[in-house]
């Protein structure tokens, strides 16, 4: 509860700095806030050790991605994109540890694939040199959400943990839509006002899911 309260206060501060475009405030605030979701994951009991390890490492990669995306340089953005892509790969591996393809809700998977295809076609005319990296990123994050649906179908796991993991993955997905909109379509504080809460909600939910799957 203490961590959640601190994180909520830092998120409010981060949004203030984002609105003011205060880079000196954004970088340390975002870094500390992201360190908190790593600490949250490390503090959880982990009845499924492999799930814990892969989620924790994924969160650490995302922490690195957060720092890079807070920097203004084009190369920093590309490095951040790669770190987030690796984070998603680790989440995929984590979800595979506990997935149940027999209980996979196929309509939800088809809907996810359809949305991702639409998003890519929406972004494609604006990507320029980032066409390849963004295409790879869309594929990986879509696979991550699909694996979260597969995890949700494993009824041997506690429903609370399953819901946290699924909602966390979807929240992360939604936040990335606003990052893409801000980067390639229309830069606006609204993107961060919606995207940052969705992102941190997703990361903290994934961190808490570690201790609640069983």
Image: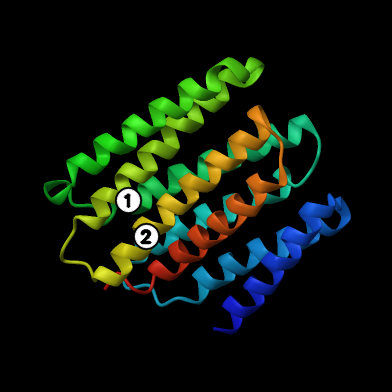
Q: Is residue 205 above or below residue 147?
A: below
Furthest-left residue in this view: 102
> How far across and how far down the image is residue 124, in percent?
54, 18
Residue at image position (54%, 72%) is 40
Give the side of residue 54 with respect to residue 30, left or right: left
Q: Is residue 26 above or below residue 69?
A: below
Image quadrant where residue 38 sits: bottom right
> How far across and how far down the image is residue 99, in percent?
24, 52
Give the side of residue 150 with respect to residue 189, left or right: left
Give the side of residue 202 with respect to residue 62, left or right: left
Residue at image position (48%, 46%) is 174
Image quadrant where residue 191 sits: top right
The C terminus is located in which quarter? bottom left
> How far across and how far down the image is residue 49, in percent?
36, 66
Report if the CB atoms under discs 2 and 1 are less than 8 Å apart: yes
3D distance between C-alphas at marks 2 and 1? 7 Å
Q: Which mark is residue 172?
A: none
The N terminus is located in which quarter? bottom right
**Count of marks placed on residues:** 2
Which residue is identified by label 1?
148
Q: Is residue 56 above or below residue 77?
A: below
Q: Earlier in the sequence, mark 2 or mark 1?
A: 1
Which residue is identified by label 2?
165
Question: Which secondary structure, mark 1?
Answer: helix
Question: Which secondary structure, mark 2?
Answer: helix
Q: Is residue 64 above or below residue 116?
A: below
Residue at image position (39%, 68%) is 210
Q: For the residue carrying disc 2, how many other residues have a C-alpha within 10 Å: few (<14), some (14-19), or many (20+)?
A: many
Give the side of residue 205 with respect to residue 112, left or right: right
């Amino acid at each position: 509860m203490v961590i959640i309260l601190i994180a909520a206060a830092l998120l409010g501060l981060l949004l203030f700095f984002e609105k003011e475009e205060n880079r000196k405030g954004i970088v340390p605030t975002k870094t500390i806030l992201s360190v908190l979701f790593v600490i949250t994951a490390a503090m959880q009991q982990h009845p499924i050790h492999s799930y814990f390890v892969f989620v924790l490492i994924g969160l650490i990669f995302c922490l690195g991605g957060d720092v890079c995306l807070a920097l203004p340089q084009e190369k920093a953005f590309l490095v951040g994109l790669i770190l987030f892509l690796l984070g998603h790969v680790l989440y995929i591996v984590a979800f595979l540890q506990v997935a149940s393809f027999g209980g996979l809700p196929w309509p939800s998977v088809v809907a996810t694939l359809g949305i991702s295809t639409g998003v890519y076609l929406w972004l494609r005319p604006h990507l320029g040199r980032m066409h390849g990296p963004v295409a790879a990123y869309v594929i990986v994050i879509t696979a991550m959400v699909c694996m979260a649906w597969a995890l949700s179908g494993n009824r041997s796991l506690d429903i609370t943990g399953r819901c946290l993991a699924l909602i966390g993955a979807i929240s992360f997905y939604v936040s990335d839509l606003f990052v893409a909109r801000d980067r390639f379509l229309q830069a606006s504080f609204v993107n961060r006002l919606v995207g940052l809460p969705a992102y941190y909600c997703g990361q903290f939910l994934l961190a808490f899911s570690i201790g609640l799957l069983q």
